[in-house]
Amino acid sequence: MEILLEISCKKYRYDFTNPFLVELDKFSICHINDHRHVFNKAWAEWLEQEPIACMIIKEKELLLMVGYSGDIMEKMYHHARYSLKKKLAKEKKKELILNSKVEEKEKVSVDRKRELIKCIEGHIKDLLYDSTSSGVVVPSPSDAFADFKKDCSQHFMDINNEYLKKSYKNKYYLFIRN
């Protein structure tokens, strides 16, 4: 007999739907280098276009339904104005890193990454099992990472802290989502 435990946890990522993101990214690409005033004027005009206005209403309803409590229009504006620029800057930075020579000691081997992922997955499984069996609220990703770092940081001292943090939080999010 299987016992299914339903984990009620707080959601930490509120994503837009793919069709809306496509439209938002199209707008962002067109206005990526615009001055703030020009961008804001184009943004106001874009919001009033008929298919976009309908999509925005649907996105607002979906985000409210899943529990988003922030300003949805501000979230959309921030994504359109800044996220794409950051994404392109990261890609440019990655390209520069790939083109430059990286010292051997800064590279993390594939085996080491696998070991890290297994350790992260084990920690998250234990954490989620402990919190559901004891009736305690599931910790936030940052609290869970702090616990992981306290337990396992000595073993992974050779790995960049930012890489550790991103790997852990992404795995945590995937476990909670699935």
Image (tube, grey):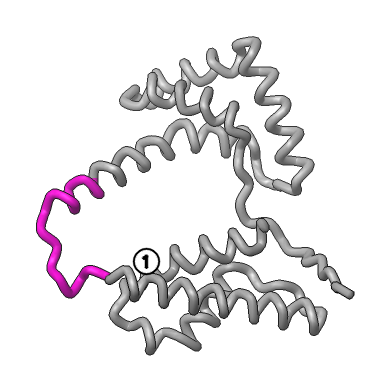
Furthest residue in direction left, as rendered: 101
Q: Position of residue 147 (x, y in %)?
A: 55, 82
Residue extending furthest front?
A: 1
Q: Is residue 154 above or below residue 68?
A: below
| Magenta stretch bounds | 93-108
Magenta stretch: residue 142 in it? no
Magenta stretch containing residue 94, yes or no?
Answer: yes
Query: Furthest residue to the right?
Result: 1
Q: Which residue is drawn at 60% across and 43% down?
A: 15
Task: Give above or below for 151 relative to 177.
Answer: below
Q: Which residue is drawn at 52% across and 78% down?
A: 146
Between 68 and 19, the residue placed more toward the observer is: 19
Residue 67 vs 27, above or below: the answer is below
Please, is residue 10 above or below residue 106 in the view?
above
> Identity of the amino acid at label 1?
Tyr
Q: Quadrant of the N terminus?
A: bottom right
Q: Position of residue 130 (x, y in %)?
A: 72, 83
Q: Where is residue 165 in the image (x, y as percent from the top left)?
A: 44, 68
Quarter location, residue 3: bottom right
Estimate how packed mark 1 is, as few (under 14), some (14 to 19) or many (20 or more) residues with alpha carbons within 10 Å: few
The percent position of residue 49, horizontal first and vertical second, equals: 60, 11
Q: Nearer the viewer, residue 110 or 98?
A: 110
Residue on which the image places disc 1 = 163
> Relative to 178, is 104 on the left or the right?
left
Q: Check disc 1 and report its element: helix, strand or loop.
A: helix
